[in-house]
Image (cartoon, rainbow, N blue to C red):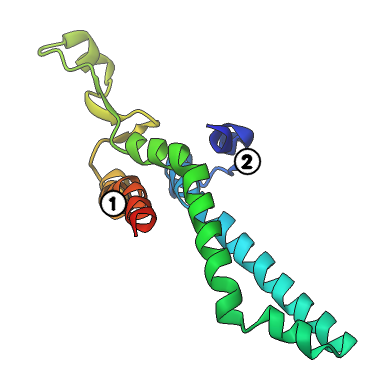
Amino acid sequence: SVPATSVSLDCSLPDYGGGMSKAIIKVIISVLAPVYCALAMSAAWLGMWYGQRWWARRKGSATLLAEIGDLATYMRNRMTVSWLTAAFFFYPSVVSALLSIFSCSDVDTAPNNGLATAAGLKRGQYWDLDYEQECYQGPHLALAMALGVPGLVLFAVGVPLSSALFLHL
C-alpha cells in the first residue's frame, strides 16, 4: 500500500547494536502510523477551532461565536471522520505489518545434517523480517504477544466491525 512504500524505514533507522532490531522498530512504527496521523489531524482541527474563535472575538461577532460552538461539539464529528479516514487509509499496511509478525520460516530442519552442524549454522524457525531472531523467542515473543495478537483482534477485526456497526446505526 502507499503508506508502506512512501518512506523506507530500513535506511532511516539507526543501528542500536544490542538493543531492539530494526525489524521490530519498523513493525512498531508501521502499526502506530494511524495514531500519528490521527493525532496530527486532531491538532489541526483544534488549531482551526482556536483560530476561528480568535477571529470571531477580534471581529466582535457574537453570531459567529455562536455558530462555531463549543469545543466538544466542534470536535466530535470532525474527529470521528478523521479517525475513520486514518484507520481505513492505513488499514492494509497496518494489517500487513501485524501479520508479518507471525511470518516465520524453517531454516535447515533436515535431520542429521552433519555439514550444517559442523559449520555451526543455525537451525529452527526464524522470523522472516529478521533472520537473527528466532521465532517466538525473546523479543519476538514479546512483540507477538504485546502487539501482534491484540493488534489483529482490535485493529484487523475491530475496525471493519466497528465501522459496520457505526454505519448500521
Question: Which structural element holds mark 2?
Answer: helix
Alpha-carbon span between mark 1 and mark 2: 24 Å
Q: Which residue is at 63% across, 37% downward? A: 7
The circle drawn on residue 142 is 1
Amino acid type, residue under disc 2 in the picture: Ser
Residue 120 percent location from the top left of the image: 27, 21
For image coordinates 78% across by 76% down, the residue present is 51
* Quarter of the figure with residue 166: bottom left
Residue situated furthest right in the rendering? 59
- Is 136 drawn above or below residue 19 in the view shown? above
- Looking at this view, name the residue that lies furthest to the left: 111
Horizontal and vertical percent position of residue 66: 70, 86
Residue 57 at what x, y percent from top left?
83, 88
In the image, 66 versus 140, the foreground residue is: 66
**Of the pair 125 and 29, the residue shown nearer to us:** 29
For the C terminus, which image quadrant?
A: bottom left
Q: Is residue 22 visible?
A: yes
Amino acid type shown at disc 1: Ala
Residue occupied by mark 2: 12
Q: Residues within 10 Å of mark 2 (few under 14, many from 20)?
A: few
The x, y position of residue 78, in whole percent, is 58, 65
The answer to which of marks 1 and 2 sits earlier in the sequence is 2
Q: 3 or 9, which is in the foreground?
A: 3
- What residue appears at the point 36 percent right and 32 percent down from the top-left corner? 132
Camera sees residue 21? no
Mark 1, Cα crowd under 10 Å, few <14 / some 14-19 / many 20+, is few
Q: Is 124 left or right of 166, judged from the image as shown?
A: left
